Image (spheres, rainbow, N blue to C red):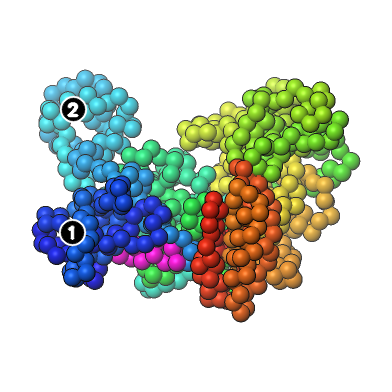
Amino acid sequence: MSLHASLSGMTGFVADVVMFTNIPKVLSYAVPPGLSPVVGSRVVAPVRNTRQVGVVIAVGQSRDDDLSLKDIHAVLDESPLLTEELMKLLDWTARYYHAGIGPCMALAFPPFFRQGRTLVRDEDPFLKRKACDHGRLGSAQQALLDGIPVEGILMSELRGRFPGSAARIRALLAKGLLEVGEREPGPGRCLPPPPAYSADQTKAIEEIAAAVGTGTFHSFVLHGITGSGKTEVYLAAANEALRRGRSVLYLVPEIALTSQTIAMVKGRIPYEVAVFHSGLPEKDRAREFMKVVRDGARFVLGTRSAVFSPLRDIGLIVVDEEHDHSYKQDDGVPYNARDLGIVRATNNKACVILGSATPSMETHERARSGRDRLLAMTSRIGPAALPEVEIVDMRTIRGPLSEPLVTEMAATLDRNEQVLLFINRRGFSAALVCPGCGKVLRCLRCDRSLTYHRSKGEALCHWCGFTMRLPEICPSCGCLDMRPVGLGTERVLTEVQKAFPDSRLLRMDSDEMTTTRKLTAALDAIRSGSVDIIVGTQMIAKGHDFPHLTLVGVVHAEQLLYMPDFRSGERTFQQIVQVAGRAGRRKADTKVVIQTLIPEHPLMEAILRHDYEAMMLQELEIRKATGFPPYVHLARCVVSADEEGTARMIAVKLAASATVPQVEVMGPAPAPISLLRNRHRWHLVLRSRRRGSLHRALDAMERVKVTGDADLRIDVDPYSMM
Ligand code: ADP
Ligand code: ZN
């Protein structure tokens, strides 16, 4: 079959279709007269007695044995939405992650398109001013007209800037002062020039720009301390690729894609920028997608799934904060956008930049072994140095705030500067314990203690969302006095309120920041100086630049360290360095106070000295001794079932099937989370130095029948070991 066949009104053709649902096979359909499906476009076709939406992956001449095929019902797109290059990447993703081709293809489409809907072309016209004399306009109409840039604007964007302006736009169109026109793909806009680059920046930009100029694959690790100005390097490299007529994919972690980030990028890229973000309304996501497919936008700024954006001829891929775990998808297809970014750059003969202040161990290893070129940026922009770090021993201190921290906080507030307290758990306390029987209040569906959320008067399971009113008495023994233990953001906030009753507080965690709008408003409030103390989770640790912030307190440094996860040391270090990096980006006299129960731990020493290499060497030793990545490759299989016996039995069978030389099977054993949403879970972990062997073992496991109510989930290069 030809991948290129495009036909109109002919009979005797067959289309191969991948449905977006989890149907393991590619389905073939007859193409009825009058329909002309093309590869990469969506169709509606019958599956048993339903109609489903899928994407055409091949079209070809039918053979005699194709006579019994059912007909396609409808073709949804006249021209392809996906390119061949992207479809190959999606196919590769399905094979690498041992996932269904349907769910993988679906990753490339915004939900609006997955559901079989289409955008009407002139639904969102591109509006331009018509240069002509006009009489006096009402002030509102005049303001609207003045607000339209010379190069024109999308109706949706104009209405976003001028809420409630639909009638005025219609009026201006009717008067002939506005017209619907074609968009000219940049560089239409004049933007302010970049700042004078630092020596580190200049060197990095020169190297990357030269590599972009060669039109071949190059990979860079940009290891720059917080505040060293990595963003300018990405933007300069991006403009270089755009100038050469190629496209740019710019990936940021989930939480970092705020309207502030979007405005900053749009202010520096003189071309059309499409934003791919799951937080946008469905129709907007579809529009941004069509900006690339239909309007030829060559710059995509987006989160994880933007790695599958339909850009053509990519010349540069930026992965900002490459160590961030949000690049790995936890549910659905367990892909890692950073890793796929490297694959996609290779396929496109493009450059890829993996940037971070705390590169992941995998990336560090790529740079060390010479696979990636390491570019280091070791000094901060401007006068600010890295903040001074103080470690406070909490072993003899009661309560969440130590005296050294409170003293520093008071001094900072006296100077009218801001304080940030970092605590990695939302809610009031980690758990509720009955002092009578010692029992912890647990989720009824998961093997996990419930977190007490005092502001809501509820106990909440952070895994499944189960909530219950706080019981007046212990459900086990009837004792009257359930007590909170362990710290959460709410509890810290309460203590801060007691110590600093006159200061303005802001809590930033996923309970508070439920919408993008709230997050944007909070970030603006911090930047404008209208809050004094911020108490937050990892949500605040990433990428943000807060000019008035001069003190960072880490309330409980070892919180992550003792999780059953081989990355816990690395993650602890990364998180603390990232959050510490929020301080002192503008002012010189800044400080970080870290409270911990393990002040002598080598990790704390490394943090004290801002010594990334020391931390890496320690961790690498541990990984080498225990046999974990980057020294080996891992895959993890989780079986879940209603009965524990079923889960165990299947896990044992899977383990027995995976007998491939050079692959070690660890387990089977109950997963650390052995009960989740009422499902019992067993897991096994495969380990090998050879990827090929690992994939063969997974292939063998996939042939094992997983029957009844049991589910098998395979995760390649897993992050969560829970
Ligand atoms: P990083 O991502 O490396 O932590 P950023 O890219 O956020 O650092 O840069 C830190 C701050 O320095 C930002 O406010 C940025 O606008 C500013 N900055 C970057 N480069 C320069 C430069 N060459 N001159 C002046 N300011 C700069
Ligand atoms: Zn639960």
Residue 135 drawn at (x, y percent): 13, 24
Residue 552 visible (yes or no): no
Total numbered labels = 2
Against 261, is 721 above or below?
Answer: below
Q: Residue at x 64, y 40 (%)?
A: 445
Residue 84 located within the stretch drawn in magenta: yes
Q: Which residue is mark 1?
A: 31
The numbered dot on residue 303 is none
Against 54, is 450 above or below?
Answer: above
Q: Residue at x 59, y 77 (%)?
A: 660
Give the farthest residue toward the top: 138
Nearer to me, 3 or 47: 47
Please provide the residue range marked out in magenta: 80-95
In the image, is 99 to the left or to the right of 57? right
Residue 649 drawn at (x, y percent): 64, 60
Against 70, is 414 above or below?
Answer: above
Residue 44 visible (yes or no): yes
Residue 110 drawn at (x, y percent): 36, 47
In the image, is 422 to the left or to the right of 203? right
Of the two numbered discs 2 and 1 on the same chain, state the one appearing first in sequence.
1
Residue 502 located within the stretch drawn in magenta: no
The type of residue carrying mark 2 is Arg
The type of residue carrying mark 1 is Val
The numbered dot on residue 170 is 2
